[in-house]
Image: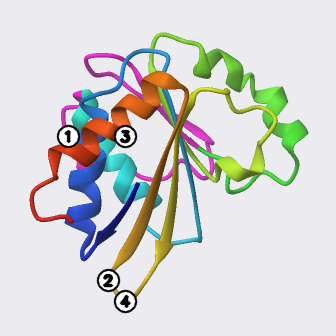
Amino acid sequence: MVIQTKSASETIRIGESMGSRLLPGDVVALVGELGAGKTQFIKGLAAGVGIGNPTYISSPSFTLINEYPGRVPFYHIDLFRLEREKEAQELGLEDYFQGEGIAAIEWADKIPSLLPKEMLLIHIAYTGKNTRSLEIIGKGNRFLKIVGELEGSRIQGVK
């Protein structure tokens, strides 16, 4: 599924719609250039998960992982500063991927062998000054169903 957005608020709204469908143990892996909108999408996910004020969410580039309480714990993982996949292995990310919360990973392409087989994969790309293309891929039956629900919901204002 590919969605074109015209603003950060549309990107956030799509993330929120997706976040409302997530369950404990779910993983959302995001890939895209620096500044493409990964953090904006994660703000939406956090809102959908039930984080009280997702506007204060920012990339945890120096701490790597920020945890937020909500209806379920929300783990925002930013791997921008990692140089090797082995560094991520030492963080114990598998605990976050199989835990009681929802994990959203920026720069997920840095840890291909550590990612779970079943997850949502989001490729975010610039298409213009304020526009983005979001390619949403479900890996595993449950996540394919989520993508189908998103397609069927015709998120208001987004084609």
Residue highlighted by disc 4: 129
- Earlier in the chain: of badge 3 and badge 1, it is 1
Give percent across and percent down for residue 148: 32, 39
| Closer to viewer: mark 1 or mark 4 | 4
Decide if residue 147 is on the left or right side of residue 136: left
Distance from Cα at disc 4 to Cα at disc 2 = 4 Å
Question: Dot 4, crowdedness within 10 Å: few (<14), some or many (≥20)?
Answer: few
Look at the image and say whether residue 111 sits in the magenta stretch: no
Residue furthest left in the image: 156
Instruction: Categorize mark 3 by other alpha carbons within 10 Å: few (<14), some (14-19), many (20+).
Output: many
* Disc 4 to disc 3, C-alpha distance: 27 Å
Measure the C-alpha gap from mark 3 to mark 1.
25 Å
Quarter of the picture containing the N terminus is bottom left
Question: How is colour applied across the structure in the image?
Answer: rainbow
Magenta region, mostly helix, strand or loop? loop
> Mark 4 and 2 residues: CB-CB less than 8 Å, in contact?
yes
Which of labels 4 and 3 is toward the front? 3
User: Magenta residues, as a range?
Assistant: 50-77
Question: Which numbered tag is attached to residue 147?
Answer: 3
Q: What residue type is labelled 2?
A: Asn
